[in-house]
């Protein structure tokens, strides 16, 4: 069995042994110690507490009573991964489990996602299992729905439906379009608009978040042919494509503090636009995908497979960077064009960012790195990425 197959089996065993629960880079406010202190009412203290946990190479969560938990986006990523593994097993490769065993996990994670919905909104939606202070601008309370978490959950539920044919699962997933249409704000931009990141006012400048809203609506159009969902989706894609720079790159967002260009959000953008095109059969944005993919693959990976975070500097190397390219390449149907590079990327990541116990590290830095195990950010993300890798590989055993 190949090196990467063994790596993935160890990751899979780790996630299953943890019952898919874990810590998160942003879960510091779940600390029972912090919740007992008066500082929890002060925005600066909340932000500093979260950043201290996030940036520390030492994990203080057990000491400060931060429990492990299920995160909706993490569960969605794991479900997406298991759905890909099911298709791998259908091809005859049962190295990662039989179809029956994988289906059990698909059913379990599907039900868990259904149970984790945020209540009180126009349609199905999901948030995170912790309070989160974004600088001093926003306090996202636990389970406040965001378009990012919701999109990953919607895609996962639809993939689950395609395997199980459970009509109730599809109904819930498609109802998320009502959340996007009714509960997210829209900010005019170019010849379209940007969807807001969440239901909170003011966070309406993030390009990839808006595209994830469009992605949700495109799924609705695929199954319901709701014309208003198609039109709104196209408006959001139009604005995002018009914000693409001539070289094919995107900045993260429209605020001055959001002007960086990074690897995995570029991948999110391309994935969302391609998904829109497939779901709506509207291929009018192909030139933006082509330019964006060329920029992505040419600027964020070294020849030896080492991924870069930013277009103009390498560190910190975030685990999202090697992971997202596998998923985006699969979605764009260009995986085989870069199979050698992707083998190097995955090989480098296993060598440099995986612990002997199977989990993956959060970030590598020039100095002291954060090698803490995070279920959503690191392990679920790489679980989905590696499942896509094996799905796309003609012969998983011979890749590396």
Image (cartoon, helix red, strand yellow):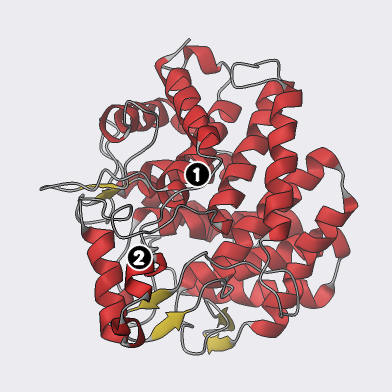
Residue 263, image x and y in percent? 36, 53
Q: Quadrant of the C terminus?
A: top left
Instruction: Determine whether the residue tagged by mark 1 lies in a helix, strand or loop.
Output: helix
Left or right: 105 as drawn, with respect to 286: right
Left or right: 339 as drawn, with respect to 192: left
Q: Which residue is mark 2?
A: 28
Q: Counting residues from the N terminus, which is met first, the one under dot 2 or under dot 1? A: 2
Front residue of 248 and 167 = 167
Residue 161, image x and y in percent? 80, 46
Name the residue located 33 percent from the left edge and 52 percent from the top edge: 62
Residue 50, image x and y in percent? 30, 69
Name the residue located 38 percent from the left edge and 41 percent from the top edge: 322
Q: Which mark is residue 380?
A: 1
| Front of the two marks 2 and 1 | 2
Judge whether 44 appears above or below 354 on screen: below
Judge whether 4 appears above or below 327 on screen: above
Name the residue located 80 percent from the left edge and 43 percent from the top edge: 162
Left or right: 247 as drawn, with respect to 243: left
At label 1, counting other C-alpha atoms closer than 10 Å, the crowd grade (few under 14, some 14-19, many 20 or more) is many
Instruction: Determine whether the residue tagged by mark 2 lies in a helix, strand or loop.
Output: helix
Q: Which mark is residue 1?
A: none
Residue 266, image x and y in percent? 43, 58
Residue sticking out furthest to the top: 1
Query: How many numbered marks, from 0 up?
Result: 2
Q: Quadrant of residue 372?
A: top left
Q: Quadrant of residue 16?
A: top right
Front residue of 109 and 314 = 109
């Amino acid at each position: 069995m190949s090196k990467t197959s063994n790596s993935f089996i160890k990751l899979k065993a780790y996630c299953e042994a943890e019952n898919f629960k874990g810590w998160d880079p942003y879960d510091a406010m779940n600390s029972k110690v912090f919740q007992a202190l008066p500082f929890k009412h002060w925005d600066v203290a909340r932000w500093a507490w979260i950043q201290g946990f996030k940036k520390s190479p030492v994990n203080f969560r057990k000491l400060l009573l931060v429990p492990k938990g299920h995160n909706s986006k993490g569960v969605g990523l794991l479900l997406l991964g298991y759905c890909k593994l099911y298709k791998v097993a259908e091809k005859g490769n049962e190295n990662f489990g039989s179809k029956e065993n994988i289906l059990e996990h698909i059913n379990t994670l599907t039900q868990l996602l259904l149970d984790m919905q945020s209540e009180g909104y126009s349609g199905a939606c999901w948030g995170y299992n912790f309070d989160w202070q974004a600088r001093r601008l926003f306090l996202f309370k636990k389970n406040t729905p965001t378009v990012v978490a919701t999109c990953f959950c919607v895609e996962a539920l639809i993939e689950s439906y395609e395997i199980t044919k459970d009509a109730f699962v599809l109904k819930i997933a498609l109802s998320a379009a009502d959340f996007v249409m009714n509960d997210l704000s829209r900010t005019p931009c170019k010849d379209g608009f940007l969807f807001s990141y969440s239901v909170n006012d003011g966070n309406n400048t993030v390009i990839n978040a808006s595209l994830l809203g469009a992605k949700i609506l495109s799924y609705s159009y695929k199954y319901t042919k709701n014309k208003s969902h198609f039109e709104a989706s196209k408006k959001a894609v139009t604005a995002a494509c018009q914000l693409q720079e001539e070289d094919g790159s995107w900045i993260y967002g429209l605020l001055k503090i959001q002007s960086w260009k990074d690897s995995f959000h570029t991948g999110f953008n391309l994935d969302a636009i391609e998904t829109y095109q497939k779901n709506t059969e509207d291929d009018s944005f192909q030139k933006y995908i082509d330019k964006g993919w060329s920029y992505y693959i040419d600027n964020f990976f070294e020849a030896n497979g080492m991924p870069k975070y930013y277009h103009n500097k390498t560190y910190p190397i975030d685990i999202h960077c090697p992971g997202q390219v596998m998923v985006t390449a699969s979605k764009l149907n260009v995986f085989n064009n870069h199979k050698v590079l992707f083998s190097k990327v995955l090989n480098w990541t296993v060598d440099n960012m995986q612990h002997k116990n199977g989990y993956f590290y959060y970030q590598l830095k020039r100095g002291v790195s954060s090698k803490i195990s995070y279920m959503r950010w690191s392990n679920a993300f790489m679980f989905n990425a590696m499942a896509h890798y094996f799905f796309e590989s003609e012969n998983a055993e011979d890749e590396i």
